[in-house]
Structures are given as structure tokens and as C-alpha cells.
Image (cartoon, rainbow, N blue to C red):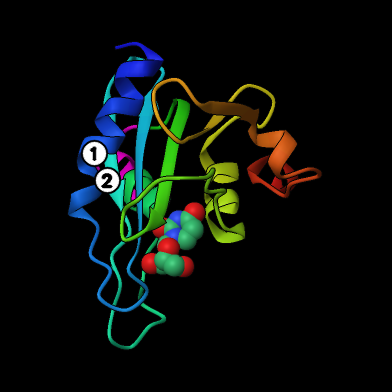
Amino acid sequence: MKLKEQIKMAMDNIKMAYTPYSNFKVTSVLVTKSGKTYTGVNIENAAYTPTICAERTAFYKAVSEGEREFERIIIMGGKEGAITELTAPCGVCRQVMMEFCDPETFEVVLAINEDEYEVFTLKEILPMGFGPSNLK
Ligand code: THU
């Protein structure tokens, strides 16, 4: 599946976001090196702190099914699900990416639609990241 199709897949899934408190909906598609895709949305909670971001939902779905090698993640979001600007991942999600991805090559794609997007490496958005290699 090509990047534009992955962006379309993310857009189509934004309706699954559960956001009764912020109404800020985020959707992601995580792509494995073998080409499989895992969707994720943010899931909020009345106690607030159990809320999970779209990016981590996608990672935890994939990792819990045995995936360990990732190529890129598409991220899109907006108030009431209207995507008008780029949504960047929070610091916690960047750290989770650092656990499973090569910061030099893993692509973080921030998209508005299939034609408007920007691609960053994990290293660009998380310089000097701390990861598994630091514990070796
Ligand atoms: N959120 C995400 O899902 N991903 C991000 O990259 C930024 C923030 C969610 C968490 C919360 O449900 C809502 O957006 C507002 O912070």
C-alpha cells in the first residue's frame, strides 16, 4: 500500500476516535516493514489520565500481535475531526516510537490530506532520544 493510500486509511478511521472530553480526534496508521498496517485512534477516559493517544493505540495493537519492525506512522488530527493543520505526536508517544523504531529511518508522516503532508524521521522530532541501545 502506498503512502497516499495509508493517509486515506487514516482519514477514514478518524470516526473511531473516542473523545467525549476534548473532542480533539486523532487517527494514525502504523506501517510495518513487511507492509502490514495497524490503525489507532485516541481513546479518552472520564478519569482523564487513562486516556491513550492514537499513536500508542496503533503501536500496542501491533506489538501485541508480535510486530517489532516498523517503517512509518501516519498521524492526523483536529478538533471535531476536522483536519486543517498538522498534528504532531506528544512526547510520550515519541518515546514509545523510540522503543521500537530506528530513529534514523523511521518516518513520522504528519498529514492534512493525501496531498498535504510532511515527513520527518523520528530523530528529527526526538533528538538525542533515550532508547533500548542505551541499556546495552
Ligand atoms: N492526542 C493524540 O491522540 N495524539 C497526539 O499526537 C496528540 C494528542 C489526543 C490525546 C487526547 O485524547 C486529545 O488528543 C487531546 O489532547
The Cα atoms of the two marked residues, 1 and 2, are separated by: 6 Å
Ligand 1 resides in the quarter of the picture at bottom left
Q: Is mark 2 within 8 Å of ligand 1?
A: no
Residue 47 vs residue 64, the one in the foreground: 47
- At 33% from the left and 32% from the top, the residue drawn is 67
Decide: marks 1, 2 in contact (CB < 8 A)?
yes
Q: Residue furthest bottom?
A: 47
Give me the residue at 37% from left, 74% from top.
22
Give the structural element (helix, strand or loop) at label 1. loop
Which residue occupies 23% across, 39% down?
A: 65
Task: Give coordinates of residue 119: x percent, y percent.
Answer: 59, 26
The residue identified by callout 1 is 65
Residue 24 occupies quadrant = bottom left
The question of residue 27 being in magenta is answered with no
| SS at badge 2 | helix
Please name whichever residue, 18 or 79, is drawn nearer the observer in this view of the structure: 79
Q: Is residue 34 above or below residue 64?
A: above
- The tag on residue 21 is none
Instruction: Give the residues drawn in magenta, as a range.
Output: 60-67
